[in-house]
Amino acid sequence: MILFWLTAATFLGRIDSQLTDIVLTPGTVNLIERQASNYNIASVAVNPPGTVVNCYIKGVGTDVTPSSPIFTDHPFTKAFTTSGLDVSWYFFFDASSSNKLNFDVYQRYDVTIECADVNNNLRSAIVVVNVIDNDAPVITDAPMINIPVTADGVMKGDLLYTVTASDPDVDPITYSYGVTPPLDIFTINPATNEIRAKVDFVAVGESPVNLSLVVSDGDKSTQLDIILEISDLNVRPEITNLPAESRIPENTAPGTELLTLLYLDPDQTAPFIPTCNVTPNTQLPVFDIIGSRILVSTGSDGKNRLDYEGIKKYEIDCFITDQYLESLGPDILTVNIDDVNEKPEFAQQMYTCILQESPALDSTCDLNLNVKDPEGGAVTISIKSSPDSQRFRFTSPTADRLTFSVNYDIDGNAMPSSLTIDIEARDSAGQVGTAQIQVTVTDRNDNSPVITATQIIDLTPASPIGAVGTVQATDADSGLNGEIEYILTAMNPATTSDYIVLLESGEIQYIKKFPDSLLDSAALLTIQARDKGTPPRSTSDIVTVRFLGDTTQPTNQNDQQAGTVASETRFFDEPANIAIVTVIGIVLFLAVLVAFYFCIKKMLLGYCCGPRKPSNVYPTSQDYGHYDVKKKGYSKGRGDYPDYHRSDSLYSRDIRSPSVIDYYDNRSMQGNV
């Protein structure tokens, strides 16, 4: 920008002007150290007027270092303005500078301004800046004022004092307050500076009370101490037997008294009601405060909640008040808990177990026992001995599962189906905790029905229609496992089903007169007795129904059945006879096999019992001739024995007897040869 004006002046012919002098107006300036805004300090006048120059701050000296001008540690700067083609220079105080005016550091600045024309003619001048010290605010009655009052003469809201303050430099001022001792007994209006009582002074238990008022302009401040002399003070109550310390075992009985609080307050006639806080705080109370008595808590469950393993020390902090003043304390009762070996505890007192009757170690149930030893030690869980409990055992030392130690059977009430057994947990020191297991044993379908008797039923043309017999069975199981139903699984011959039926109850019904074609025949009914267990078990038996001609009827059905069974006993009704017939059949079968073997051998080998031996009269095939290896046989000639002379022949000339010729001439033997 300066270059622009110099260029413009050159074209206008003003470049020929030469600078001869500069004048700073004013030459001396007073600035307060609290100067808060930009301030024009001096303007530069040049001779001859209108000469185009460029001005700058050459140096700044201070009252502290006048011979060594500083260049950076000051809040001054240059500037210029333009009016048409004229340029006017000045310099000013820069409020945004980080270097502030401070009377306690520099009380005077000598600012040297230097200007140069286009021909570099230099001229300079000095302006003196004096720093004016800031005055502190003024407070009426400073530095101290005493205000005497009586405790019962000051009520809440009463005016105690109005503060009057001002600042000689007309700087904004602020107020701050502090109270010694730190009592919250005043209110101060920041607009009116009125100080009033926040409480009735009966609640003030100390005197004197010093209210320190500080008024500041941001740089300097003035303090006023307002001292309240309070007479006829209310006496503060106190607890006289705290602090204290006690030691109790963890098994201290609920309701045990630890301490009765004692008080002192000459102004108080009514009994005090203390307020106490227990640390650490627990979900359920450990101590009760009844009146002035501190007791071990008695909960609704009647249990002692002291536990050395959990919390070893409690602090009971108490205070009292006379409605104005509280006791100051510290009023603390320290309760130390001593360890006592406690019995293990089951998580619950009754566990349930459902088993099925079974052989030993077969059926099991999960107990999920949860046992805690207060001391954190190991515990041993066992079943307390009793006649019933001896039938049970744990499957492992951890007592996770219960099972039978014997073959357990509840059929026929042989063993109880519901019982309670006692268990115990014992720690290493011999303390024992107990609980119970409610055991329910359910029936297992482990017995098949037993049909009590095999029946033979005789029917004649004169037999009446209706029930003619009943199949009966028993089952040792209980419930559905022991309920029996009867099922006809087969009837032989099937045509007799038109005359005989079986009911589910086991009753055999004669439902229709049988025809003459069935006379002297019998029907075999295969009847199954099946229980209703899961899975069901069954037994089958055969009932014989005989269709007879008219005979003298027995007087009752039982006599009829007994007579019929006695008169109709057959050979194969006896087990011994059946066994004899079976053995004979097996022996005959083996004999047939042996005979078959020898027959096959005869057909294939030509003999039954062994190979044929050589004859004492006739030669064997080995003596017929020479053995041909290639043909694998003996050669045959014209009926003679060409090899008889061989040494390997059984009949050589030297040894054979009789001769070959003798054999040859024997006509009766030619066929054999």
Image (tube, grey):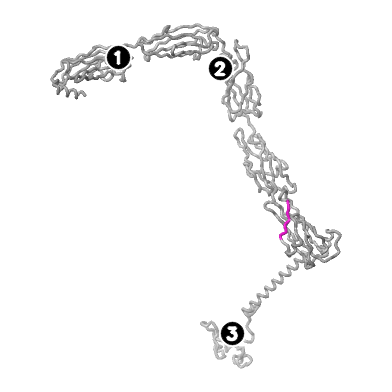
> Where does label 2 land, which residue?
329
Q: Badge 1: how crowded within 10 Å, few (<14), some, or many (20+)?
A: some
User: Which dot marks residue 18?
Assistant: none
Q: Secondary structure at mark 1?
A: loop
Task: Check the image and report above or below for 314 versus 351.
Answer: above
Name the spot of residue 256 as percent of width and height, x first: 65, 23
Kindly identify the amino acid type of the residue bearing the numbered disc 2.
Gly
Q: Earlier in the sequence, mark 1 or mark 2?
A: 1
Of the 4 image quadrants, the one containing the N terminus is top left
Q: Is residue 571 visible?
A: no
Mark earlier in primary sequence (3, 2): 2
Left/right placement of residue 84 relative to residue 351 reads left
Q: Earlier in the sequence, mark 1 or mark 3?
A: 1
Mark 1 or 3, which is nearer the eye?
1
Residue 122 pos. (x, y %): 17, 18
Q: Which amino acid type is shown beneath numbered disc 3?
A: Ser
Residue range highlighted in magenta = 483-489
